[in-house]
Image (cartoon, helix red, strand yellow):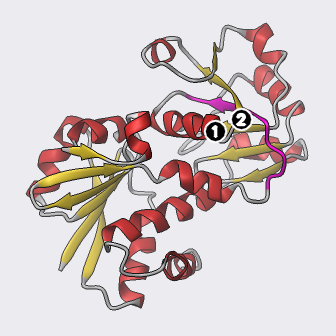
Amino acid sequence: MKLFAIYGNPVAHSRSPLMHNSVFRAHGIDACYTRVHLLDGAQLRSDFFARGLCGANVTVPHKEAAFAACDEVRGFAQKVGVVNTLVREGERLIGYNTDADGFIDAMHDFETIRTVAVLGAGGTAKALVQRFVDEGYEVHLINRSKERLEAYAWPAHTYTWSDTAAIKALRVDMVVNTTSAGLSDNTMPLPQSLLTSLLAHSRYAADVIYGHTTPFLHMARSMQLSTIDGAAMLLGQGVLANALFIDHALPLETIRAAMQRSFEL
């Protein structure tokens, strides 16, 4: 039996085992997918091989550590330095990023996007910012502090929370929360006054968190914005990751159909 897992901290909330195991069961694939609560991202590589895994997904806060753990990084992940999917080839660890394409897939109902504000500056933000730029969007990145903004050559206009006047002057089509605010508490990804201003001058809001309506999305909906949560992105990236796990043995739409059914469980 082939073994797969998702690494994260926290990770107990992850739907990934349901999604991937749904595909394995539906198509008679001898494989099992589980969760691994990993505190130290530096231990990811050794833990992966110690468990005898064939592949894994990686969620917050270990996506940059996953990049460092790889022997080879392919495709879009090379550009952003962030890996969310690992595949074992012999004794080599190969890294990919399926987050960004999964998010673009989830945006199919959002029309005429030209400008985007991204909240947070972690691994998910790196992937999404670059993908948005590749799509031709103007991107504004807002983070609590300047350290992460200065540690990476962001292809975006950058702001800290202290840049209140500049943030209040922003007019964007979509606001995307990539932080963990609202995952297990009632916090917001931006101070209330700044977030109110940002959403008041936007049409769409998206949150990478799934499983419940975060305070951010609740606020956006109360202001009549069209919204998506992280479930749509999760499905999109999961389909692409599963195709890598099974070496493209099934068509993407076949994988998608099986995964979609897992959301009904």
Quadrant of image for the C terminus: bottom right
- Asked whether residue 179 appears in the rendered view, the answer is no
Where does the image place residue 245, in percent across and percent down from the top left?
Answer: 32, 68
The magenta stretch spans residue 113: yes
State the image quarter where residue 70 is shown: top left
Residue tagged by mark 1? 132
Residue at x-position 77% and y-position 27%: 195
Q: Is residue 252 left or right of residue 86?
A: right
Where does the image place residue 111, in percent across and percent down from the top left?
Answer: 83, 51
The magenta stretch spans residue 118: yes
Report crowding for label 2: few under 14, some 14 to 19, many 20 or more residues within 10 A (C-alpha): some
Viewer-proximal residue, 261 or 242?
A: 242
Alpha-carbon span between mark 1 and mark 2: 5 Å
Look at label 1 and name its amino acid.
Answer: Phe
Look at the numbered discs 1 and 2 and tell me whether their residues touch, using CB distance below 8 Å. yes
**Counting residues from the N terminus, which is met first, the one under dot 1 or under dot 2?**
1
Residue at x-position 53% and y-position 38%: 180
Look at label 2 and name its amino acid.
Answer: Tyr
Residue tagged by mark 2? 137
What stretch of residues is rendered in magenta? 110-120
Residue at x-position 17% and y-position 40%: 43
